[in-house]
Amino acid sequence: KPQLIASSFSLLPSSFLQTVLGAGLKEKLIQQELTNLKATVSAPTTTLRLMKECMVRLIYCEMLGYESSFGYIHAIKLAQQGNLLEKRVGYLAVSLFLHENHELLLLLVNTVVKDLQSTNLVEVCMALTVVSQIFPREMIPAVLPLIEDKLQHSKEIIRRKAVQALYKFYLIAPNQVQHIHDKFRKALCDRDVGVMAASLHIYLQMIKENSSGYKDLTESFVTILKQVVGGKLPIDFNYHSVPAPWLQIQLLRILGLLGKDDPRTSELMHDVLDESLRRAEINHNITYAILFECVQTIYTIYPKPDLLEKAAKCIGKFVLSPKINLKYLGLKALTYVIQQDPNLALQHQMTIIECLDHPDPIIKRETLELLYRITNGQNVTVIVQKMLDYLKQSKEEYTIINLVSKIAELAEKYPFWFIQTMNAVFSIGGDVMHPDIPNNFLRLLAEGFDDEKEDKQLRLYAVQSYLGLLEEEDAIYPQKFLQVMSWVLGEYSYLINDEGDPEVIMTRLHKLLKKTFVTSETKAWIMAAITKIASLNPGSKTVDKLIQEFSTSLDTCMRQYAFELKHLCEDKDLMKNLLPLDASCDDMVVDASLSFLDGFVAEGLSRGAAPYKPHHQRQEEKLSQEKALNFEPYGLSLSSSMSTSGFTGRQSPTGLSFGSDISGNSTEMGQKEMSSLKLDGVKKLWGKDGYLPKKDSKTGKEDKLEAVPPGSTLGGNMVDHPLSEADQEVVSPSEEEKEKQQLASTLFVGLASNNAVSLMGKADTTTQKFKRKSKISETQNSEEVPSIQHDATLSSSPLPEAQSNNNENIQSTEHVRLRKTSLSSSEVLEASISFKRPQSLMEAGLDAKLPDCRLSPSSLFADNNMEVFQPTQVIPSVAASKASLIPSLSEELASNPHSEAVELCSSDTLAVNLCKVWTDDCLLLVLFVANRSSSALKNVNLVFENSEHFKIVEGLSYHFPVIKARSLESCQKSVQMEKNCMQEILVGSLNYHLEMETGLEFSVTLSLIDFIRPMKITTEDFGKLWLSFSNDVKQNVKMSPSQGSLSITLNTLQQKLKLHVVDIVGNEGLVACQLLPSVPCLLHCRTHAGMLALWLRSPCSALPDSLLYQCQKVIEES
Amino acid sequence: MIKFFLMVNKQGQTRLSRYYEHVELHKRTLLEAEVIKNCLSRSKDQCSFIEYKDFKLVYRQYAALFIVVGINETENEMAVYELIHNFVEVLDKYFSRVPIMISCLYSNNNVSKTT
């Protein structure tokens, strides 16, 4: 065979090689060569000898990556027709060109069959070789008998190759060679070492799949290994005077598989393993390879103490070796071994620590793998920290995926650590921390991971740990922490029922209620918890005591709770119904129309009660009264009351709907009553215009008992509760408070980044992150313009505007979440009433042009109005030197209405610009990535973080293979709104590699307006739709004199909000729009005495509020 | 299991390649470029085994020539490391001097099989 190889290469045309190599592998040359070859191989005059040369050339071209499929068929022909040498090259070419499933392979079968029957040994050899490399599965039966015969051939090389061919068959079609298993045994006992060695491949494979079937062969393998180790093999098999090392390794593996969990079989191999360890003492790499395998086998089979000891010593040699390759092997062995014997890690701990900081990342990586195996409750923190450190430096995708999943696994494996970390977070973070942190924590706890059992364990541990904390008499915990504790105890204390007495828990909570440092808000949480526990444990003495105690409390709130509890305790069924077990994640079904109250309201009205006035109406009345008293100009007083009064003002767009009569949500109402109660004192509540104090309190209570049948009302209320107060605090924080907040947020960025990677898992970290961000920016903003909040004058500067937006934003999302109205309700509607496709925006643009010709479609949305929703535009634009990189939209896109390009983020090397394009059916984000550096950037990845509000249709990431120096690349992402919101931030990052891994973070603010499109319908359709929508919101807006007629106002709305004016009749106007993809919203406008009455209806409850807010804003601004 | 066997020079040009698992042609070129980039970026005092994607690379340098073997996780790295040397020794024996190896393109198709 070697001679064959040698001669085939000696025939290589040296001129060809020189050309190809000398020319530096120029593509052109190779293409030229390929063209020539193509002509030559297909020419009928080409001799086989020339064909052989062509094949060699083709092989070379293909190896360089140039496909030469035209030659495949000729390779097969050559194998068929050529003389020995030509046949050899033909077979070689076939085995290199084709793959298992290649159709041409079938053409080879006949040739192989013919050659197998040949009397020429070399031909038989060649056929067997090609079969062992590549053969079509379905044609195995055609050659199998021939190859089986070859097992008895007198020549060992033929026997060996036959075994190899059968091995191939076993790999691709094990069933077809089932019947020749005893022939394999014969091969194993063959007098020729080569044949025996070849059969080991088959055995390793078979034993891997089913070790129990081959136990009887253990002794044979042991004997073979003994012979090999003892140097009984011909000296040809030695490698650096080590006898057949690879054969030894193979045998050791087989023994390991056989001896696993089987003491009797293991016993048979103890001696030989011991001998292998002893023999392999020569200082050479290959003996280390054998030793490594030996150690692994010793630790795989049923353990034998003295062997283990010797193996451990061996590992020590590896780990302590100055040779890096051995160190690696040592670590690998240690990783494997440590699962059986963790003490070994202790022996080598110093080495492990050293390896952890080894300059070679591969060693580091292997060390982490080792540490991962020895993680326990105590060291998990440190180990995960080390893993995270490594992660930060790593840029290899596979490593990252691997490590992250390991970290996540650890986090789930050690709920104790998770809870402990969070305990530390809560006690340190205290009340200054962002309310999202406890909320997310509770949500994670409630929603859990995928494994129900693990969830239970986690919750149980939380309950236990909190009970432990509450046991300490004098400890003072932050309010937020206490709230978290009471929620968890309320929801999950039933989990420890076996070992803990609910009375004890309630007594602890009861004690807390009496502590002076506990705020009334926290008390509400605690009461809720007690109520929940009480529902599971009827007839508790503590509850009775508690009811008695607080029924006479001076704190109205507490009294209210005590009464509620009392009523609930009297009606057990209602209580069970109201507070189901472990239902915190179930969606609440809320009858938004409050239809069940109709009778009550009618009754009240018939008894002469004043009709209910919406909140805004009351507000207006109140304002007009105020105006009468303090002689300030109207406008100023309006704005001042609007931005200062946290709760009574228009603090959120949804806040407006609190008062809207029919669509008002009872929970919100109830909640609002409660919060006002606590925050503003009793007096203010009763003082509200339009309320009948007596009726009011009654409704409030009734609502609570009846309005929200399933789901834990109290729990639900409580979770959202602290937000309002926290936001209240944010409005005017003292300097000190601000500093604290900032410190806390920096602190929690670190802590939470831990969580983000490892703990939160399912929790929505994006919103959490973004919200924290928005809050920080808020604080910064308020530092920059501290006067704004207090002066409460409406300034034209965009900053406070953005700030108030943020503020509203946080609250509005909370409310939206609370409502939990799904957008999908519109789909049902769409089925019944069909309306036309959305009016093209271009059309809207043209319509808009009519009254005001100066507005081009593109400038339409790029006016200052849009800036308010895109605070990022405030950032100074790109410097002049980078002028060449100014992004511009393609013509096709530019024909749609779009925003101007805004810089999102930039560094010395890169700049990211964004252009929003409002197409008919989606919002397109066009991102321009400009490479400012003088070198090309490769593998630039743009990734958006997952957002609960938005869905990016094409996936979250985009990959730029290369961005040339000083050039611009762009990508498009179409965004859909998943969850209704006023304005949310989409966070993303750009990662690229230049000397080191760099990431640029950016955020895109998307507002509701980005997703609003005109809906072109007729007046008739409008009427039909109007009646079918249940959610409505009304509001009166004052029109400034400049706005004049209704049509002008509506045109403004049409332009700025992309609405469609359906009809205008007299002083009434109909406007329709839709939230993409297809949630309609209808607007009815009516002017009356300088006021514009807006009435919005939609199938989605949150949409009218949000849209109303936008309309109001537009009207106020114009 | 050995997945592939590569000989690449320092300039990143493939001198010999043999795949034991089918890999598409254009992917081969990419893989080879990546593999050699990985090997070249390592210094002499770093270990000769690299974790690359879901498999491992074992490489050995002879003058300007790298021999890289791609293996899966069941393989013994050191054994493969020595196998490379064995292969080179065999070549050396037949062709008297290693540099000539560059011209011996396709002789390896059986060596790995016998491990």
Image: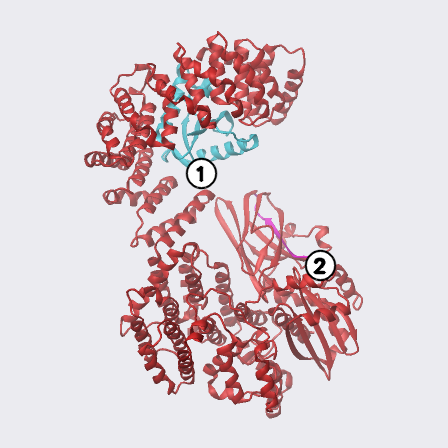
Chain colours: A red, B cyan
A465 shown above or below A172: below
Q: Residues within 10 Å of mark 1 (few under 14, many from 20)?
A: few
Residue type for callout 2: Pro
Q: Is residue A933 magenta?
A: yes
Instruction: Point out the frontmost of discs 1 and 2.
Output: 1
Which residue is the extreme one toward the left?
A306
Q: How many marks?
A: 2
Q: Are marks 1 and 2 in contact (CB under 8 Å)?
A: no
The boundaries of the magenta stretch are: A920-935
Tell me where residue A136 appears, x and y as whole percent.
Answer: 53, 24
Q: Disc 1 sits on a residue from what chain?
A: B
Q: Which residue is mark 2?
A: A897
Under mark 1, the amino acid is Asp
Q: Is residue A823 left or right of residue A545?
A: right
Which of A1057/A303 is in front? A303
Which residue is denoted by mark 1 in the rendering? B54
Q: Secondary structure at mark 2?
A: loop
Numbered label attached to residue A1067: none
Give percent across and percent down for residue A975: 61, 56
The secondary structure type at the circle numbered 1 is loop
Read off the chain for label 2. Answer: A
Q: Is residue A892 left or right of residue A50?
A: right
Which quadrant of the view contains residue A166? top left
Query: Residue at (45%, 82%) from the top-left corner?
Result: A678
Q: Nearer the viewer, residue A459 or A435?
A: A459
Q: Quadrant of the C terminus of chain A?
A: bottom right
The residue under the point 57% across, 88% down is A689
The answer to whether residue A85 is above or below residue A507 is: above
